[in-house]
Image (cartoon, helix red, strand yellow):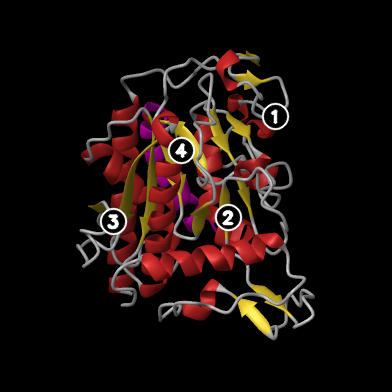
Amino acid sequence: MGCGNIFFTLTITFSVALITYNIIISANAPLKQELPGSSQGVLSFDPIIKMPGDRKSTLTNKKRLFHTAVTASDSVYNTWQTRVMYYWFKKMKAKGGVACEMGGFTRILHSGRPDKFMDEIPTFVAQPLPAGTDRGYIVLNRPWAFVQWLQQADIKEDYILMSEPDHIIVKPIPNLSRDGLGAAFPFFYIEPKKYETVLRKFFPENKGPITNIDPIGNSPVIVGKESLKKIAPTWMNVSLAMKTDPEADKAFGWVLEMYAYAVASALHDVGNILHKDFMLQPPWDTEIGNKYIIHYTYGCDYDMQGKLTYGKIGEWRFDKRSFDTKYPPRNLPLPPPGVPESVVTLVKMVNEATENIPNWGP
């Protein structure tokens, strides 16, 4: 009982310290921002829009470089994915040529200690949350890691792309943000209206309608660096508050940290252009089309006739969870005929990366 009280006290002390830090870091600039098409900071247009075909007509000719940041642990599972991700980042940045707006890259390693891949991947070592603070939800380390990185690192670019280890860039990414708005992928399962009662604990009525909370997570998002410096501490605090609230924890589950980012962005009046073409997710998205990122979060299971057998292990499969404690081998077998382009492309790109990354393996 005494240990429990000590842990609770430490947790509260840590949260209060973060909240204090949030107030300090946000005090130098007003949180309210007028946005194009807004009335007192409330968006009055549908933010789900396509990027104009002629970007030069709406954006300046000056390149607006963004820095790509990926949070990761030092687990085998996160490490092999990040190595593949960084391989394709470099290749697509080079493919973009002199006009490419992809700037630097950082793996934000929240294990608290360097690993042997520091020379292969540009890395910032962040400290993890105090033991037990995440309550078994390791994703809470992500916002805390971003707070540390933004405070301590010398980031040259004016924009940040928050990405993840299981992202593969399939073509050079332009800076999709504009006019003070971030650019984000809309997730169908982030439903602020459905959970309005719960969310009002963290997004009060005086901040406007619940629709001000965009249906996004923190990734993929391109956002101004200065905006993210304001958002990140709030994202951290809201994540902790949601995790310690039984109703919110039950409602949001494994996407709790995504809701927390969406709320934090709205609290700071940073709206987002929702780009459906930002990312595709096999096996549900079957074509690459105009997408920029493959997110391979779902398992891909097929029979040998090319029929999807989702929910049942297929005769052919690719699932990142098959390699949670070991590296995927080089030259994975390609899918059988009839499997969609997105899945075929995913496996080919993993194979190319593993073939060319030196010393592939743990």
- Left or right relative to 107: residue 305: right
Front residue of 229/344: it is: 344
Q: Which residue sits at x=59%, y=75%?
A: 318
State the extent of the magenta-drawn residues as a range: 226-247
User: Which residue position holds label 3?
Assistant: 121
CA–CA distance between discs 1 and 2?
A: 20 Å
Q: Nearer the viewer, residue 40 or 331?
A: 331
> Would you say 251 lies left or right of 168 here?
right
The CA distance from mark 4 to mark 3 is 20 Å
Which amino acid lies under the numbered mark 1 shown in the image of this protein? Ile
With respect to residue 72, does 174 lie above or below?
A: above
Where, quadrant-wise, is the N terminus in this rendering? bottom left
Pinpoint residue 255: horizontal percent, then vertical percent: 57, 56
List the residue tagged with mark 4. Answer: 96
Q: Position of residue 204 (x, y in %)?
A: 58, 33
For the residues labelled 3 and 1, the Cα–Cα distance comes to 34 Å
> Where residue 271 sits in the image (x, y, percent)?
57, 28
Q: How far apart in space, not on screen, are marks 2 and 4 (Cα)?
A: 18 Å
Which element is circle 4 on?
Answer: helix
Q: Nearer the viewer, mark 1 or mark 4?
A: 4
Whole-number angstrom distance, CA of label 1 to CA of label 4: 24 Å
10 Å crowding of disc 3: few (<14), some (14-19), many (20+): some
Residue 294 bears which disc, if any?
2
Mark carried by residue 49: 1
Count neighbours of disc 1 (C-alpha within 10 A) and say few if under 14, some if 14 to 19, many if 20 or more. Answer: few
Which mark is first along the chain, 2 or 1?
Answer: 1
